Amino acid sequence: MMRPLFLAAALAWTIAASLPATARDGLATTMRAVLYEEDLSNPKGNRADGKIIWRVEPTTDAAAPSGDVTIRGDIEVPSRNLRMTLSIRRNFDPTLPATHTMQIDVAPDFAAGKIKQVMGLLMKVNEQAKGAPIAALTVRIDDSHFLIGLSAVPQDASNNSLLIRSRAWMDIPILYAMQRRAILAVEKDGDVLPLFNTVFGH
């Protein structure tokens, strides 16, 4: 019980201490993003199309080696007024039992209202496939900020790296404050794969 609580506290400190970084020029790729929302009046749920713009930024962590990069994904789903940023980086804090962290920042005025929790991270081969879960712990900082710490247990880390580098889509399950469920699916294939190989190839 103490280990998850410690990780939660450490992740909360990490997101509070993070600083914005300047994007590197000329390294941005636009791909698809899809928001699937539960709807009690529609058994199939609702689908809203959007986009994600992937790029890399220099990592701002003072403990990171020179040249280390953070993957950033800027998501926009216009019909739901959703704007979200994903920041994926290696972890260099020895007190934090995670190989990597994913920071999720949600802009205000999301049409669905407040988010109660991000329920994890799954990888899948295509948009319609069933996702395979990543071994990780998610911490809710507040309604707009969440952090996912990827397990540093060696077998988990190996499996996580393989899934993240080999699967073309990422699912982020979400629970709204109104108790409705949703899944945000984002594409990370093609030109984006070298970015993930760089960050997860260590």
Image (cartoon, rainbow, N blue to C red):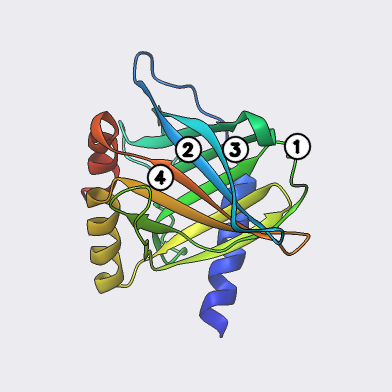
Q: Which residue is mark 3?
A: 84
Does label 2 or label 1 sit earlier along the sequence? 2
Mark 3 crowdedness (10 Å alpha carbons): few <14, some 14-19, many ≥20: some
Does label 4 or label 1 sit earlier along the sequence? 4
Determine the residue positioned at 45% across, 22% down: 23
Give x and y (percent) for residue 129.
Answer: 34, 56
**Element marked by disc 3:** strand
Does label 1 or label 3 sit earlier along the sequence? 3
Image quarter (top left, top right, bottom left or bottom right) of the N terminus: bottom right
Labels 3, 2: front one:
2
Left or right, residue 16 beside residue 74: right
Q: CA distance from mark 2 to mark 4?
A: 20 Å
Q: CA distance from mark 4 to mark 1?
A: 24 Å
Q: Which residue is mark 1?
A: 108
**Closer to us: 67 or 176:** 176
Give x and y (percent) for residue 3.
Answer: 51, 79
Q: Which residue is mark 4?
A: 89
Inspect the image, locate mark 1, and give the three-letter code of the amino acid beneath it: Pro
Labels 2, 1: front one:
2
